[in-house]
Amino acid sequence: MYALQFSLRVLLVVTAYIAVVIGGFVAGSHLWADVIFSITIAFVLVATLAAIFYTGRQRIYWRGFCIIAWIYLLLAFGPWAEGKVRNHLVTDQVLRPVHRLITPIHAARYVKPGFQLQQKSENTYQTGPRSEFVVWGGTWQMTRRIGHSAWATLLGLAGGYLAVIFSKRNTAHPPAI
């Protein structure tokens, strides 16, 4: 079995990306969702250039990254994704409890002065005498966009490392003729 090795630079970049994603989840704004989605697309585009122009082990890594990241982005954000593919991805199911966890933070922003935030039902928070915040409203779409962008990057990283591992196994045992 091969040990995975991470450079300090990679660890810092991944940590910074995760911090931005968590900030996006908490902020729950369209701007954050768009920024994280744009960062993800830019990163995968640069990785595609790396897959084309690098050589050796780096090229193998970036090819594995790109294959997994692009396929996941197409599955999660393609024109056919809504209702047909995305709802059935395990990663989408993982995002649902995350969204339920951060929904009270989003709902607290809409509480009327002098009113205490109350959970009215499993899917609704009372934010005022005649106002409520629905769990699966507009913030769910932002959580989804942020979450699937993060999943594409993280799965791409895993795909890159798997590609390197598979290439080592392939060179260790050349095929018999």
Image (cartoon, helix red, strand yellow):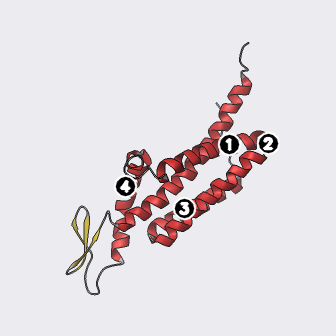
Judging by the rendered image, the residue that carries numbered circle 1 is: 63
Judging by the rendered image, the residue that carries numbered circle 4 is: 96
Question: Which mark lies nearer to you, 3 or 4?
Answer: 3
User: Tag 1, which secondary structure?
Assistant: helix
Closer to the camera in the image, 175 or 8? 175
Above or below residue 110? Residue 55 is: above
- How much space separates mark 1 and mark 2, taking CA atoms? 11 Å
Please, which residue is most extreme toward the front here?
79
Q: Amino acid at mark 2?
A: Thr
Judging by the rendered image, the residue that carries numbered circle 3 is: 37
Whether residue 38 sits left or right of residue 175 in the image: it is left
User: To which quarter of the image does residue 134 belong?
Assistant: bottom left
User: To which quarter of the image does residue 164 belong?
Assistant: top right
Closer to the camera in the image, 156 or 82? 82
Q: Amino acid at mark 4?
A: Arg
Q: Which mark is residue 55?
A: 2
Provide residue 163's location: percent of width, then percent of height.
65, 37
**In terms of sequence position, does the residue under pointer 2 or pointer 3 come before the other?**
3
Mark 4, residues whose alpha carbon is within 10 Å: few (<14), some, or many (≥20)? Answer: some
Whether residue 151 sits left or right of residue 60 in the image: it is left
